[in-house]
Image (cartoon, rainbow, N blue to C red):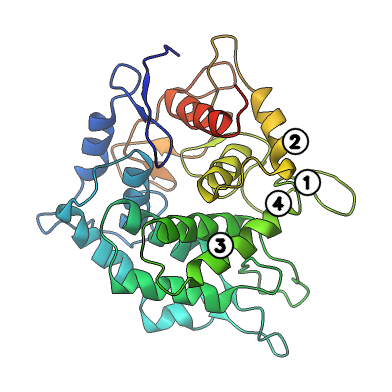
């Protein structure tokens, strides 16, 4: 990747120039399926083309903050997240004798908080989502939606994205009570205690029950993988913690001959139609032998913040 392929940003990974990746074309592709009222005619969580994931994708690509034309999609998300059934089984469950382990897919709230703040659209409902995450946090510092009674440890997939949302919320000046910062630090410690990717009791790699192999760089939809875990630790200010060293070493070993980094596991299919696990945007090249400019920008940002250059 050319040295001028990115524009440094203080708050997160640098923006990729149009010569390396056409962000404007990606924005247009993500938004062209809106109706006249600004909504998308599907369920808010439709994988991966509903309003929830469209807003996430826009924020991930650095869409300009304060675009009020996005608010109708955000209203669709809030209608879903604040519906009465969302807080009842099976969406949210409390098992007998385990009132300290609320079963909730907290990644949904975490992602919504992250893009609402990142896109400059946060309001009092965003604040309420933060309060909910704090009330659902498990004793070990994370979250889990596993309904099995024997599930006693938080899920990394359901913890990383709430952590990212809380971190973005706290740095945006909305955390007046300090609640988000406390929850953020507890969640970060859960992941750091496993060196991000390895089990404590035997040192073996963490292999989740669902999702891709976290040792591989996944893109564009990630719940837990090497690069996203390090990116979130960078945003939290913890990437220089010694417990990130092994993950940083693994990331460095993935650098290709052209100095870029690859998408090792493509997690969405680009399509102009609404399909299962589809995306309207083109996210650049994939494959272990091909550098991806978006992934490379994230990886370089992480390594620079970790003082690995």
Q: CA distance from mark 1 to mark 4?
A: 10 Å
Q: Which mark is residue 184?
A: 3
Quarter occupied by the C terminus? top right
Residue 44 to residue 252: above or below: below
Residue occupied by mark 4 = 192
Please name the residue shown 36% across and 61% down the image. Answer: 173
Q: Secondary structure at mark 4?
A: helix
Residue drawn at the location 67% of the way across and 33% of the way down: 248
Callout 1: few (<14), some (14-19), or many (20+) C-alpha neighbours within 10 Å? Answer: some
The alpha-carbon separation of the residues under discs 1 and 3 comes to 20 Å
Residue labelled with disc 2 = 246
Does the CB distance between marks 1 and 4 fall below 8 Å? no
Task: Tell me the element at label 2.
Answer: helix
Q: Please give left or right for residue 163 compared with residue 27 in the image.
A: right
Label 3 secondary element: helix
Q: Residues within 10 Å of mark 3 (few under 14, many from 20)?
A: many
Q: Which residue is mark 1?
A: 198
Q: Quick check: marks 3 and 4 in contact, CB under 8 Å? A: no
**Residue 105 visible, this orientation:** no
Instruction: Tell me, yes or no, whether the two marked residues, 1 and 2, touch with CB atoms within 8 Å.
Output: yes
Q: Nearer the viewer, mark 1 or mark 4?
A: 4
Q: Residue 62 falls in which quadrant of the image?
A: top left
């Amino acid at each position: 990747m050319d040295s001028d392929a990115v524009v440094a940003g203080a708050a997160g990974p640098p923006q990729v120039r149009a010569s390396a990746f056409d962000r404007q074309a990606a924005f247009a592709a993500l938004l062209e399926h809106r109706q006249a009222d600004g909504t998308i005619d599907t369920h808010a969580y439709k994988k991966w083309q509903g309003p929830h994931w469209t807003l996430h994708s826009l924020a991930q690509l650095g869409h300009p903050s304060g675009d009020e034309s996005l608010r109708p999609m955000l209203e669709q998300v809030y209608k879903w997240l604040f519906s009465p059934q969302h807080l009842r089984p099976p969406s949210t469950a409390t098992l007998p004798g385990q009132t300290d382990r609320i079963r909730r897919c907290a990644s949904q709230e975490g992602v919504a908080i992250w893009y609402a703040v990142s896109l400059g659209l946060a309001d009092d409902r965003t604040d309420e989502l933060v309060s909910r995450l704090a009330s659902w946090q498990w004793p070990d510092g994370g979250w889990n939606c596993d309904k099995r009674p024997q599930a006693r440890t938080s899920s990394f997939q359901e913890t990383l994205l709430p952590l990212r949302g809380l971190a973005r919320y706290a740095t945006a000046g909305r955390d007046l009570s300090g609640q988000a910062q406390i929850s953020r630090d507890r969640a970060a410690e859960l992941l750091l205690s496993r060196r991000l990717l390895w089990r404590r009791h035997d040192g073996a790699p963490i292999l989740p029950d669902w999702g891709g192999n976290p040792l591989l760089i996944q893109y564009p939809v990630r719940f837990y993988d090497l690069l996203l875990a390090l990116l979130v630790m960078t945003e939290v200010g913890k990437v220089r913690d010694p417990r990130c060293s092994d993950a940083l070493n693994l990331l460095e070993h993935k650098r290709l001959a052209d100095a870029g980094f690859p998408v090792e596991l493509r997690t969405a299919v680009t399509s102009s139609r609404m399909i299962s696990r589809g995306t309207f945007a083109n996210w650049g090249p994939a494959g272990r032998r091909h550098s991806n400019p978006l992934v490379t920008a994230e990886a370089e940002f992480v390594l620079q913040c970790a003082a690995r250059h």
